[in-house]
Amino acid sequence: MLQLQQFIRSQVNQDLDCSESSVRLMVMRTQMVGLIAQRAAIGGVQSGVDGAARPRPAWRPELRRKLVVPKQKPGRSRVLAC
């Protein structure tokens, strides 16, 4: 299915007709939904990591929390002299 999707993308990028390939992909997806329904009917369960359950890190740099490092003023020391 992934290879067919890549093939469709290449056809689109070359301005070629991809209707036949797209119909084949829709048939494959319909068959996949049918197989999933059959598995659910006989008691099959999807086990694995739930992507919605764990927080995802921000992928955009502007949304990441920036660490603020205080600037030291020239001529002043942070250590108290005794």
Image: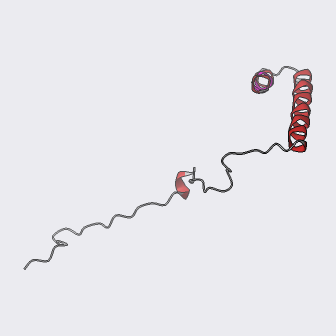
Which residue, as the protein is rendered here, is positioned at the far front? 42
Which residue, as the protein is rendered here, is positioned at the far bottom? 82
Q: Nearer the viewer, residue 37 or 80?
A: 37
Q: Is residue 49 left or right of residue 64?
A: right
The quadrant where residue 36 appears:
top right
The quadrant where residue 3 appears:
top right
What's the colour scheme?
Answer: secondary structure
Q: Is residue 79 left or right of residue 4?
A: left
The residue drawn where x is 16% and y is 71% is 77
The residue drawn where x is 88% and y is 21% is 17
Which residue, as the protein is rendered here, is positioned at the far left? 82
In the rendered image, residue 73, in percent from the top left (x then y), is placed at 23, 69
The quadrant where residue 47 appears:
top right
In the rendered image, residue 49, in percent from the top left (x then y), is placed at 66, 48
The quarter in which the C terminus is drawn is: bottom left
The residue drawn where x is 92% and y is 21% is 20
Q: Nearer the viewer, residue 9 or 28?
A: 28
Tag count? 0
Q: Is residue 81 left or right of residue 42?
A: left
Write down the region rendered in magenta: 5-9
In the rendered image, residue 57, in percent from the top left (x then y), is placed at 56, 53
In the rendered image, residue 44, in percent from the top left (x then y), is placed at 82, 42
Q: Nearer the viewer, residue 3 or 79?
A: 3
The quarter in which the N terminus is drawn is: top right
| Predominant SS along the magenta part | helix
